[in-house]
Image (cartoon, rainbow, N blue to C red):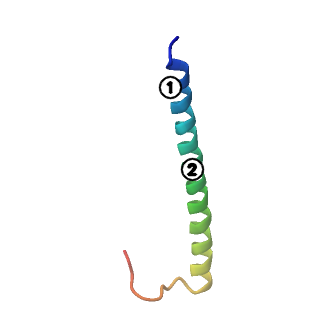
Amino acid sequence: MTHLPYILTAYGLAAGFAIFLSAGAAIRLKRDRTKLAALEATRGGSRRGGELS
């Protein structure tokens, strides 16, 4: 009996989980950048502290 199906399943699950977490992080990042842009627009676009550019 070969162990190949179990190994492929484990790698598939790990890759799927990594993709799921990465997609969630990308969605949160886009949402937070949108919120930041709206916040900066209401404050006149000026940052408190120093510029990080």
Find residue 3 and report its horizontal and vertical position in percent.
50, 18
Label 2 sits on a secondary structure element that is: helix
The picture quadrant where one finds residue 31 is bottom right
Residue drawn 52% across the image and 37% down it:
15
Locate residue 52 relative to residue 40 in the image: left or right. left
Question: Which quadrant: the C terminus?
Answer: bottom left
* Disc 1 residue crowd, few under 14, some 14–19, many 20+, Cα 10 Å: few
Of residues 3 and 8, the one drawn nearer to the viewer in this rendering: 3
Find residue 10 and report its horizontal and vertical position in percent.
54, 31
Q: For mark 2, what is the residue?
A: 21
Q: In this view, does 44 lie above or below 28?
A: below
Residue drawn 52% across the image and 11% down it:
1
Of residues 40 and 13, the one drawn nearer to the viewer in this rendering: 13
Q: In this view, does 36 lie above or below 1?
A: below
Q: In this view, does 11 lie above or below 36?
A: above
CA distance for labels 2 and 1:
21 Å
Q: Residue furthest top?
A: 1
Residue drawn 50% across the image and 25% down it:
7
Label 1 sits on a secondary structure element that is: helix
Q: Residue furthest left?
A: 53
Of residues 24 and 3, the one drawn nearer to the viewer in this rendering: 3
Disc 2 and disc 1 in contact, CB within 8 angstroms:
no
Residue drawn 47% across the image and 88% down it:
48
- Mark closer to the chain start, 2 or 1: 1
- All told, the count of numbered labels is 2
Locate residue 49 relative to residue 42 in the image: left or right. left
The picture quadrant where one finds residue 32 is bottom right
User: At label 2, which amino acid type do we have?
Assistant: Leu
Q: For mark 1, what is the residue?
A: 7
Find residue 42 and report its horizontal and vertical position in percent.
62, 84
